[in-house]
Amino acid sequence: MQPLSMLLEGLFHQLTPGDVLRKARAFTEEDVLQYSKVSFDSNPLHIESAAAKDVGFQGPLVHGMLVASLFPHIISTHFPGAVYVSQNLNFKFPVYIGDQIIGEVLATNLRENRNRYLAKFKTRCFKNGELVVIDGEAVALLPTLTVEQEQHKENQGNV
């Protein structure tokens, strides 16, 4: 299955069940520090290598919710004006600073709702392209089913 983000720019595509949208990202130490500040999550497992290693991790962990923020980013980038309605998440494996993460949303159900579209997505994050570190489902209210192509920006990896 070819991700929509690989379609030629300038083509219009209507979202259909089975379509996949992806975003690649490696989280930095600065990302983790900034997220700790804004979320008030100062758990030493995210900041102190010794604390993380003392409980069996390889090093400081990237916050699971920071990694999961890829899902609303993917949806809102391709559907500006989308309203994120719900998300459930299962955190399966740790993510460390510098890990290559691919966030993926798979459209599973679409239905019209008062000139908008209620879209259900299967959501997953992969580490190193294969290990599922987060999975779940999201629901969003989309203003349209027309998929917008993400504009390439510095420091953003697109798949």
Image: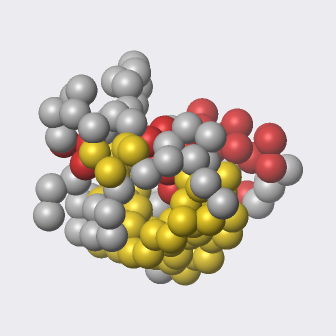
Residue closest to the far right: 40
Counting the numbered discs, the total is: 0
Give the image's coloring scheme: secondary structure
Please state, as top left, top right, bottom left or bottom right, where the N terminus lies in the image: bottom left
Residue 26 visible in the displayed image: no
Vertical arrangement, residue 71 with respect to residue 120, above or below: above
| Front residue of this view, candidates 115 and 62 | 115
| Front residue of this view, candidates 4 and 60 | 4
Apparent side of residue 51 relative to residue 62 in the rendered image (left or right)? right
The quadrant in which residue 133 appears is bottom left
The residue sitting at 70% across, 37% down in the picture is 34
Apparent side of residue 150 relative to residue 65 in the rendered image (left or right)? left
The residue sitting at 39% across, 19% down in the picture is 154
The residue sitting at 66% across, 60% down in the picture is 114
Residue 152, percent from left and from top: 34, 24
Residue 100, percent from left and from top: 33, 50
Residue closest to the far front: 115
Vertical arrangement, residue 149 with respect to residue 141, above or below: above
Apparent side of residue 99 relative to residue 71 in the rendered image (left or right)? left
Vertical arrangement, residue 145 with respect to residue 120, above or below: above
Residue 36, percent from left and from top: 75, 46
Please state, as top left, top right, bottom left or bottom right, where the C terminus lies in the image: top left
Vertical arrangement, residue 26 with respect to residue 138, above or below: above
The quadrant in which residue 109 appears is bottom left
| Front residue of this view, candidates 109 and 65 | 109
Apparent side of residue 147 relative to residue 140 in the rendered image (left or right)? left
Residue 66, percent from left and from top: 61, 53
The residue sitting at 28% across, 45% down in the picture is 13
Residue 112 visible in the displayed image: yes
